Image (cartoon, rainbow, N blue to C red):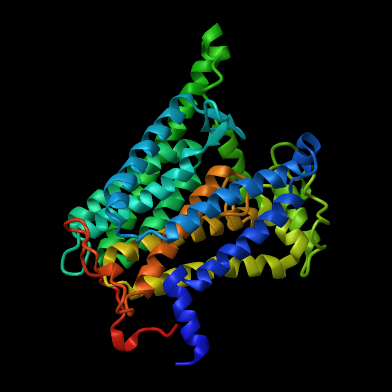
Amino acid sequence: MSEKASRYIEMSRRYGDIWIWGIYLTLIVFSIVESYSASSRDVAKMGVYEPVIRQVVFLAMGAVAVVGLSRINYNNRMLLLVLIPLLWIFTVLSLIYVMVNGEIINGAQRAFTIPGIGLTVQPAELAKLSAVTALAYIMAKNQQDRDVSVWGLVLSTVVVAVFGALMFQSGLTNTLLLMCISGSMFLIGGARWKKLIVLALVYAVVAGVFYVWKEASDKREANMKQLANTENATTDKKKVDRTDVRNERMYNYFHRDSLIYKDVTSENSQEMFSIMAQAHGGLTGVGIGNSRECSRLPLAFSDYIYSIIIEETGLIGGVFLLILYLWLLSRAAMIARRCHRVLPALLVIGMAAMITFQALFHMAINTGVFPVSGQPLPLISKGGTSIIVTSIAFGVMLSVSRTINNITNKKNKDEGIALPSGLDAENPTEIPVKNEWKQ
């Protein structure tokens, strides 16, 4: 083995997968640069450096989480038996609280502020992380003949349904995103194709029921407000009716050619200026900091930051960023296939799928492949909760990769540490030793 290869293996054993570290650091660079470029509206209110300082502070907090988690073994009993269940409980309670008494952000009831420190939390972001850990636990606990048992699939479906229902108010894309993440985890968990097809049908039925229920609920509340000419009905600001907004977005999505002949209005400004930004960027872009549309595009620093990235770096920069997220998923898949146990395989692929699918949803919304909806670009869009959750996901992936890289190290038996009963099932998708991929 060459000296270079030996040094690479030693670094991977000490710090975790080097390629994941490279992707993480590259995304941080994108985040700092583009958050500054896309914050024209915030600059007018907060000053020239305030937006980027806030972004750097959240990135620094996230970096602490990444480094700290990367040094903790994924099979730490305190993490598995105490911290993760507490995360589930906190997330569910937060989602319920937001449904009842949440703050309205960008026209949707989706957040709450922690008293005293003024930190705004969006539980929908925490729900994705909680769902991944819950599904990993359930599927690892319910392995049968190198397959997920029927009971395990039922419990997993219930988890997805519960989190999906609680997140539905903050956007349909969150529920769809959760379904995509869970599907990836089912594949790694060894579920047979017949079960996956049945599961997809169940998801379709459940999603349809949720959508019809939500539409009926919104219309009923709207009718009650129109009929009830009372003070309570007119001053209730916590009930947010987004039926007309969704209908308008779906109409514009299926009639996109009509946007060419429309004037820019408050209803279609996101789509119009997003398209203009991407068209202005062309192949190579207009250069960092030279965006023309960042001052006109609503939410350019969060839900539409990918459009600004394309405007400044062109199609080349946009494709590079896309490849970066896909590369992360591929590295996670390679690590998952090397795990002897199914729990770390599910954790690493679940975290990577959460990040990658969210990035793909964001890009699809920006480019018009999906209807307009709010979805941040992981680690790049402005938003404290999203950055912290994404950083935690990176930390978990690095923890798993570091442990797996130490399997061949005779001085380190991290994966041999006893797991709680029932969580030590073999990984059904593990690559045989003779076919093990090279570092």
Query: Residue 127 falls in which quadrant of the image?
Result: top left
The reply, left or right, for residue 389 in relation to residue 247 is left
The reply, left or right, for residue 292 in relation to residue 305 is right
Q: Image height check: is 168 above or below 81? A: above
Pick the quarter of the image with the C terminus: bottom left
Query: Residue 214 falls in which quadrant of the image?
Result: top left
Please provide percent x and percent y for residue 293.
Answer: 79, 50
The reply, left or right, for residue 154 in relation to residue 207 is left
Outermost front residue: 411
The reply, left or right, for residue 225 in relation to residue 297 is left
Outermost top residue: 230
Q: Image height check: is 277 above or below 247? A: below
Instruction: Depth check: give the residue in front, 199 or 354.
Output: 354
Pick the quarter of the image with the N terminus: bottom left
Q: Does residue 187 appear in this view?
A: no
Instruction: Depth check: give the residue in front, 393 or 277.
Output: 393
Please provide percent x and percent y for residue 381.
Answer: 63, 50
